[in-house]
Image (cartoon, rainbow, N blue to C red):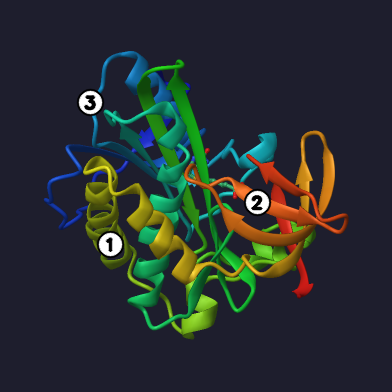
Amino acid sequence: MSERLFVKRLTDFSCEYQGPFVTKIHVFDDILSTNAAVHELARKGAGEGTVVIAQTQRKGRGRFDRVWQSPKGGVYLSLLLRPKAPPEKASLLGFVAALAVTYTIRSFNLPARIKWPNDVLVHVKKIAGILLESETDHTHVSYVIVGIGVNLNTDLALLPKDVRMNATSLHKEHGAPIEYEEFLTTFFHQFDRFYQLFIAGCFDQIIDLWKQDNDTLGKNVRVQTTNGVLQGTAVDVDESGFLLLKTHEGKVVRVTSGDCTVIDAS
Ligand code: BTN
């Protein structure tokens, strides 16, 4: 593993989790990006269940090539998956991750909800983001990296103003710091649960669970896509988790990716 990626390895970290999903955890106190590190491991043949966790990231990656600011106090982790599933279902792994994060946050008595596709919010503010990166061809998924950033005990003042305005943390919502290792252990158990459904091909069940916890469907939304802005009512998601948006002209458009903003309840 190159020095460039892994700056310093943590020695005093322990995670209780010994479940079926995680096969190997690499823990670092500082790294460029946990997703980049898992890509490197995957290309070298690392197996499903390989996890990289860091306490800080210097070049954390967000969706649409944005920077994911990663100060101390947050959770930054990436999971390597090699599911034997059709490529068109790979995007549902974002739902799997969002459900796992949502249930984990709820275990701390906080009302987590999901905004399409997989932002996790508490009181309408973003508390966690998920970045999926994959190597697939038309017929086969080589691997999927699920990168998760959670504002756990993050000092929100360290985030840029535009991010801070729409962000919250577990610490802030809970009123006290959250134990890092307890959060991780709970998260891995939750991820196991939902990933088992995915492996078993229970895609409809994953979508149903996502629908129960989402805060997007039925709302009037604006979606910034790479091809421009779409506006309308979020009517449903399809079997890949893509958003079905009914425009004001009455046309239903399938949106595969984008930044969704809820304008109001419609
Ligand atoms: C988003 O834009 O909402 C997704 C953010 C994902 C950030 C996480 S932090 C751990 C992992 N490593 C990265 O470089 N990015 C993801």
Q: Residue furthest front?
A: 250
User: Is residue 96 visible to us here?
Assistant: yes
Q: CA distance from mark 3 to mark 2?
A: 35 Å
Mark nearest the camera among 3 and 2 is 2
Viewer-side residue, 266 vs 261: 266
Q: Which is more N-terminal, label 2 or label 3?
A: 3
When asked about the image quadrant of residue 248, the answer is bottom right
**Disc marking residue 244:** 2
Badge 1 amino acid: Glu
- In space, the residues marked 1 and 2 are separated at their CA atoms by 38 Å
The spot of residue 174 in percent (x, y) is 46, 83
The nearer-to-camera label among 3 and 1 is 3
The amino acid type of the residue labelled 3 equals Gly
Tag 2: amino acid: Leu
Q: Are marks 3 and 1 in contact (CB under 8 Å)?
A: no
> Which residue is drawn at the image coordinates 36% and 68% (left, top)?
103
- At horizontal 38% and vertical 35% (from top left) the residue drawn is 8
Q: Secondary structure at mark 2?
A: strand
The residue labelled by disc 1 is 181
Residue at the spot of label 3 = 47
